[in-house]
């Protein structure tokens, strides 16, 4: 049985790596001839909205799923006419648009940061007056890993607002959205899977730390979170899954301020903050996504290995392979991508029973020297 995946990056690659032991095979579509899912799956090289490429992707597959949400509407429309797709186009449309996400959260009674939309330069000035400063200006569409957003500090003047408009206004941005800058205490994410029959499983709550807008470290279960907050996050994800009549893995990113949760965004797919589930859970987010979209029973989200996990992203450069492998207890995932500043090249996970010991082991990665060109053999 062949599963089609739109996108051929590391998420598609890890979906394939999770599905191969289940006897599944994979075909990915990606514009890049060196897309790294191609190491574990058949790769169709082409634009996402090229009907010929979509036809090649869809030929004979059981269904098509997605490794990212910024799929052109033309692609989902074409695919929906020709093959089963999951999650649904409606879920993808919501996940593509920060305004639709916020409206969904509000309709479910989930708090969001104060926000206002802007469709032109004058509208941006008005929106910033509404939210006040400091604030974060984001494109409604096509933003990720801190791209597509500009922070305006307290005291930002009219010229700074104009500069934000110039930096972010581009075809495809879908207009801008201004959010009040949230002085959160912590960032959390809740990851869950919903099967075709409506069964839901939820992973332990995750705490996330970012560096330069990119996820640096995820820890599960999020340490020292009051049970009421865990319960609220779990209720939010149940409500969102039901509202979207969702099939597959869904992630909600949250800000915690005091005891209050504010929803930031959803990801209608497997998520970087769930990579620890590969070794840290009985059934990983990748396997559960496949189980869900295929209509099989969902796997156990309970934690393995003593119940504590930490994942660290390897961004921009990798330590040398022997150095990484020399840290005993580290589960290393290198994606086969050529190094580039700000690029996610891999991650490493530690599982154990003691929070401080697990974090200390994961911290050792930061002290390792960078590899030299050629060390990994895929420097591009
Ligand atoms: P996003 O692309 O919306 O996930 O934003 C990337 C990161 O920027 C988040 O994980 C936060 O660390 C930060 N961020 C985004 N929105 C806000 C906000 N309204 N207030 C404070 N920090 C934010």
Image (cartoon, grey):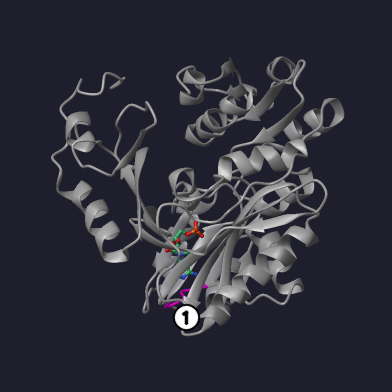
Report the residue at 72% width, 67% height from top: 103
User: How many dots with numbers?
Assistant: 1
Task: Please say whether residue 225 is visible from this viewpoint.
Answer: yes
Task: Indicate whether 184 appears above or below 16.
Answer: below
x, y (%) of residue 185? 40, 77
Question: Within the magenta stretch, is there residue 192?
Answer: no
Quadrant of the image containing the C terminus: top left
- In the displayed image of the protein, which residue is found farthest to the right? 81
Check disc 1 and report the residue beneath it: 257
Disc 1: residue Cβ within 8 A of ligand 1's nearest atom: no
Q: Disc 1 on helix, strand or loop? A: strand
x, y (%) of residue 204? 53, 62
State left or right for residue 280 relative to residue 7. left
Question: Within the magenta stretch, is there residue 182?
Answer: yes
Query: Which residue is more in the foreground, 267 or 196?
Result: 196
Quadrant of the image containing the N terminus: top right
- In the displayed image of the protein, which residue is found farthest to the bottom? 258
**Dominant secondary-structure state across the stretch colored magenta:** loop
Quarter of the image for residue 187 reads bottom left
Report the residue at 31% width, 42% height from top: 315
Query: Which residue is more in the foreground, 308 or 31?
Result: 308
Report the residue at 13% width, 40% height from top: 369
x, y (%) of residue 173? 59, 49
Quarter of the image for residue 86 reads top right
Query: Which residue is more in the foreground, 90 or 12?
Result: 12
Query: Which residue is more in the foreground, 264 or 241?
Result: 241
Q: Residues within 10 Å of mark 1 (few under 14, many from 20)?
A: some
Report the residue at 73% width, 39% height from top: 293
Task: Please say whether residue 343 is visible from this viewpoint.
Answer: no
State left or right for residue 126 relative to residue 84. left
Magenta residue span: 180-184
């Amino acid at each position: 049985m062949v599963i089609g995946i739109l996108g051929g990056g590391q998420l598609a690659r890890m979906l394939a790596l999770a599905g191969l032991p289940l006897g599944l095979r994979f075909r990915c579509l990606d514009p890049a001839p060196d897309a790294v899912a191609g190491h574990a799956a058949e790769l169709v090289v082409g634009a996402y909205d090229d009907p010929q490429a979509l036809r090649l992707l869809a030929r004979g597959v059981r269904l098509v799923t997605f490794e990212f949400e910024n799929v052109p509407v033309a692609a989902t429309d074409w695919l929906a006419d020709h093959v089963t797709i999951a999650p649904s186009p409606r879920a993808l449309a919501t996940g593509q648009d920060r305004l639709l996400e916020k409206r969904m959260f509000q309709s479910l009674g989930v708090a969001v940061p104060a926000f206002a939309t802007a469709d032109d330069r004058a509208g941006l000035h008005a929106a910033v007056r509404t939210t006040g400063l400091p604030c974060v200006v984001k494109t409604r569409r096509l933003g990720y890993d801190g791209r597509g957003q500009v922070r305006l500090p307290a005291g930002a003047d009219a010229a700074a607002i104009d500069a934000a408009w110039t930096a972010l206004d581009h075809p495809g941005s879908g207009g801008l959205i201004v959010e009040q800058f949230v002085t959160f205490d912590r960032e959390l994410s809740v990851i869950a899977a919903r099967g075709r029959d409506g069964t839901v499983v939820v992973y332990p709550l995750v705490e996330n730390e970012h560096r330069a807008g990119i996820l640096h470290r995820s820890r599960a279960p999020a340490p020292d979170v009051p049970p009421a907050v865990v319960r609220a996050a779990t209720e939010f994800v149940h409500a969102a899954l039901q509202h979207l009549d969702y099939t597959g893995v869904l992630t909600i990113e949250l800000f915690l301020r005091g005891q209050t949760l504010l929803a930031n965004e959803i990801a209608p797919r497997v998520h970087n903050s769930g990579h620890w589930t590969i070794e840290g859970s009985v059934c990983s987010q990748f396997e559960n996504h496949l189980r869900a979209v295929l209509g099989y029973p969902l796997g156990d989200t309970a934690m393995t290995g003593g119940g504590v996990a930490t994942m660290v992203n390897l961004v921009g450069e990798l330590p040398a392979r022997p150095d990484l492998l020399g840290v005993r207890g580290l589960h290393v995932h290198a994606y086969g991508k050529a190094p580039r500043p700000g690029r996610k090249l891999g991650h490493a996970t530690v599982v154990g029973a003691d929070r401080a010991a697990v974090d200390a082991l994961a911290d050792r990665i930061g002290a390792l020297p960078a590899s030299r060109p050629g060390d990994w053999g895929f420097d591009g």
